[in-house]
Structures are given as structure tokens and as C-alpha cells.
Amino acid sequence: MTKIPEPINSLSALIDKAHESKPDLPRPHMGASMIGHPCRRKLWLSFRWAVVEEFPGRILRLFRRGHHEEEWIVSDLRAAGVEILDKDPDTGKQWLIKDGHFGGSLDGVALSGIPEAPSKPHVLEFKTHALKSFNDLLKNGVEKSKPTHWAQVMVYMEGVNIDRCLYVGVCKNDDKIYTERIRLNKTTAKDLNEKAQSIIASDRMPEPISSDPTWFECKFCNMHDFCHSSHTTKEVNCRTCAHSTAKRDGTWHCGRWNSEIPAVEFQRAGCEDHVMHPDLVPWTLTGGDGIYANYSHNGKEFQNGAGGFKSRELLANFDGCMDKNVQAIRHKFDGEIKC
């Protein structure tokens, strides 16, 4: 009898690679799901698209599972007698709140049927948890165990003027369900909104939560290399440009062209006159004329922006760009050298 060969695990790698080839782009707004994070620098860097986290395929599939879980939780709640609006009746789409550049999307609104307050509407928030996380949630509740989730629902309740939330946590290991009713704290919601607007309006990068690279909140942060090692972004887009300013009305203004920056798709690409924001590179700003910037670094003086080195050139190979022969060739052909 012929033995069936052991399967080769190459297919799972191909599945993960397929997910990695279509990563989620950074969101255009500062999300309520993050505003409870204690590090203001992390929030600023994320909003500025300066450090974009890349996830392996397995994690991207986990995110997908979490999205699908929302539909199943809604189905289970309805089966238990809860009346739910999973879409905003005014738009027919997911519930959204937005205040300038700050906002988020609700998982739904329960109109009635929650046993402890059957006639009261509740904001709905659904989360999936690994076993360790779920057990901690059971022991300590949302505010202590998941402070970012707690902050998120505070913003949501304030945003839709509903003073109660039903938080539903599902354990991915054994499908256990945890539910908790959370009351709106208006002072907390106000403080969180003010925190968001303050970070969004800041043209300069905030201080990190710690200067110690071994600090527990820094060790596993995707901003760790930037904050504690390279101090250099890898991203060239309108939001990492020194010319851009976030406006209170949710738009961006470009100082180079003295105009509103177009849609998000344009912001992701930027323009040829991009100038690196001085807080996102370890270079020393020595001057400029509002169109370009003069920088110095490691004993080298150079110009970044219109008429000088393009940001992509400098980030791709700084030492190569500073080479005199490269500069001579670049000057001769009056163009960009792919360093």
C-alpha cells in the first residue's frame, strides 16, 4: 500500500503572502480606538503616517477574523432579544463619528432588549481576545484591563449622545462571551477629545512616554526603532512633509503651494517638492526659504526640497547622496539620482 506523503506547508505560506501583498493602508484620521494609548508621540507618528506598522499574514488573518466576529455577535444578540441597528439609518452605512481629523466607527447601537436596562439604547462595541487577554478581562473589567477600549467607547458614547455602552468580548480559544455595561463619563470623554485635537494640531512631535528603550510600553511598540534608535522615518508623503499642517476642519494645508492638499490618495504620494519634517530625521535644520530646507548631518551640509535632494533620495542612501562624484553627476544632469 502506497504511503500518502506528508503535506508540505508551502500553501499556508502562500496564503499569508497573499494577505501581505494587500496590507491595510494607514487610516486618514486619528482613530478613537487609539486615543486611550498613553504615548502621545505614538499617536502623533501614526496620524502623520511617519511609522507604518507592517503585519505578517497570520496577524492580518486574525484581524479579518475579528471583523467577521462582529456579524456573528450581532446575530447572537438578536437571537437573545436585543433590537440592534448595525447601520446608521441616516446613511445606510456603518455608524461613524467625526470631529475634524478625529473619529471612529461604531459596531452598532442596541435600541432595546438588554436585560439590565431593556428600554435604554446602548452603543455596541465588540472585541475578540486571546485566552490570556480574556481571562484578564474577566478578572478586572474593561476600564482596568483594556483602557484603550474603555477610552474608545467613551468617545463613541459622547459622539452619538448615548450614555450607555454594551461591551462584548469573545474568547477566540473557547468562544466564551464576556459582557459589560459601561456608563458615559462626560469629563473623560471631553478630556479624550481635547487630547486628540491637541495632538492633531501639533506641528512638532511630542515627547515619548519614556526615553528608556527597555520601558515595558516601549519594548514591543512598533515605534521602538524610530524613538530609541534610528530617529528616521521611512515614509515620504504629505504628512511627513514640513510644509503640511492639519487644519481643525479635517483638511490639510500645504505651505509650499499655499493651498489645501487634495484627497487622501494624493497625500499618500506627496509631491516632488517634499521636505522632510525636521522631527522625523536626525538632521539639524540650519535654514531654508519656505520652499526648501537646509540641513546638516555628520559634517555634511545639504539642501532638501525644491532645487535640492529629494526626500526619497536622502532616505534611500544618505551616504551615497553625499558622495561628491554622485553630486557632480546629479548636478550635470539636473535630475534625481537613485541613490
Image: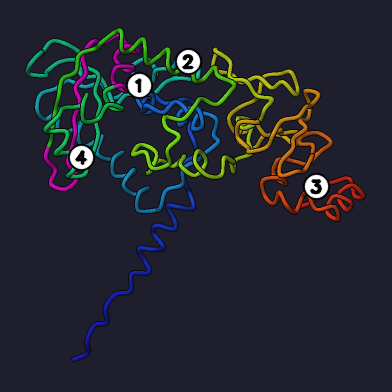
From which residue to which does the magenta span run? 151-176
* Residue at the spot of label 3: 336
For label 4, the residue is: 133
Question: Looking at numbered disc 4 in the image, what kind of residue is underneath it?
Answer: Ser
Image coordinates for residue 277, horizontal then vertical, percent:
65, 31
**Disc 2 marks which residue?**
197
Q: Residues within 10 Å of mark 1 (few under 14, many from 20)?
A: many
- Residue at the extreme bottom of the image, as rendered: 1
Label 4 crowd bin: few (<14), some (14–19), many (20+), radius 10 Å:
some
Q: CA distance from mark 4 to mark 1?
A: 27 Å
Q: Amino acid at mark 3?
A: Glu
In the image: residue 325, left or right of residue 110: right
The answer to which of marks 2 and 4 sits earlier in the sequence is 4
Q: Is residue 158 magenta?
A: yes
Q: CA distance from mark 3 to mark 4?
A: 50 Å
Choose mark 4 or mark 1, whichever is in front: 4
* Circle 2 SS class: helix
